[in-house]
Image (cartoon, rainbow, N blue to C red):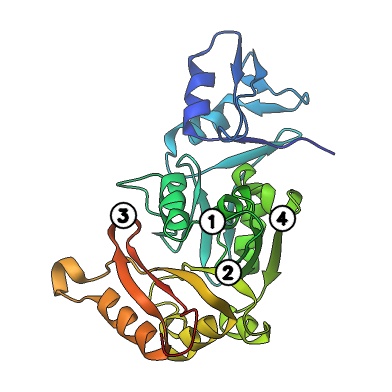
Amino acid sequence: MMEVYLITFREARRLLSSRGSVRLNLDLRKTNRTLEVTRDGEAFVFPDGGKVEKEIIERIARDASSVYFIRNGGVYKVAIAGEHYYKLVPTIPPTIEINGVRMHRTKEVNPLQDTRNKVNAVKPKEGESVLDTCMGLGYTAIEASKRGAYVITIEKDPNVIKLARINPWSRELFTGGKVQVIQGDAFEVVKKFRPKSFDVVIHDPPRFSLAGKLYSGEFYFELFRVLKPGGRLFHYVGNPGKKYRRKDLQKGVMERLRKVGFVGVKRVEEALGVVARKPEREGE
């Protein structure tokens, strides 16, 4: 299998400052592995023998918001242009940007810390089954599986799945054996699961303006239905509009969750979401 090298402005700048050869991490810091890249006049020779011109490396060095992959001397931006514009952003670990909107928090915390805050809110255990409704790069599904849970994750957008397949930090989605990836609309896919199928649901939808039906009472009823008695739910909401418009989206979410039967509904500030559980018995 032909090796793919991933680089960002960080690695490009190191290459430009080198005089001979330099050892670089070429998997977005997923591992500590380094490989040797050698300078050859106005080009750089990668471990597979492919040459990349200095001019291209200079362009990458100036682009602090993108990730590039190199294969057999060819250089490509990790981005997809279609109905929307998707690209991998070189945070550590990376996040996806869709039409300029990042899919993870990257200011107060990095995407991995953000993921752990969400998963810690419901604490999946060894042997439990977890439904992750909106996969993205799959960090939530991977983190839950590392705690011993079996995870089903759903992703509507095939372009997001394509970027996940390129991203080294998403590799366990497709190789670990404890995560099942379903491509489809979570609003419809969840209806196909049997009642009481999951111990935990982690619901991390796109913003309300992009996926309003995933914040609806109808969808919350389906999440309630597929949870086992005593099952836990974490719902990422964020606080869009609260600072400037005094709009509290979390409050509306909590009210709709209670209406379909969830109890113990409360905010989890560090994860910018809410938790809830399905009663052990009816009428609890």
Q: Residues within 10 Å of mark 1 (few under 14, many from 20)?
A: many
Question: How busy is the neighbourhood of tag 4: few (under 14 within 10 Å), some, or many (20 plus)?
Answer: some
Distance from Cα at disc 2 to Cα at disc 4: 15 Å
The Cα atoms of the two marked residues, 1 and 3, are separated by: 16 Å
Mark 1 residue element: helix
Q: Mark 4: which secondary structure?
A: loop
Q: Earlier in the sequence, mark 1 or mark 3?
A: 1
**Location of mark 4 (residue):** 178
Neighbor class of circle 3 (other Cα within 10 Å; few <14, some 14-19, many 20+) is few
- Is any atom of residue 156 visible in this view? no
Does label 3 or label 2 sit earlier along the sequence? 2
- Callout 3: helix, strand or loop? helix
| Residue that numbered label 2 is attached to | 199
Q: Is residue 196 toward the left or the right of residue 270 in the image?
A: right
Q: Quadrant of residue 140?
A: bottom right
Nearer to us in this view, 154 or 9: 154
81 lies above or below 107: below
Q: Alpha carbon of mark 3 to alpha carbon of mark 4: how far?
A: 27 Å
- In primary-sequence order, the first of circles 2 and 4 is 4
Tags 3 and 4 touching, CB below 8 Å:
no
Furthest-right residue in this view: 1
User: Disc 3 versus disc 2: distance between alpha carbons?
Assistant: 22 Å
Q: Which amino acid, by three-letter code, is at mark 4?
A: Lys
**Residue at the spot of label 1:** 140
Is residue 200 placed above or below 211 in the rendered structure? above
Which amino acid type is marked by label 2?
A: Asp
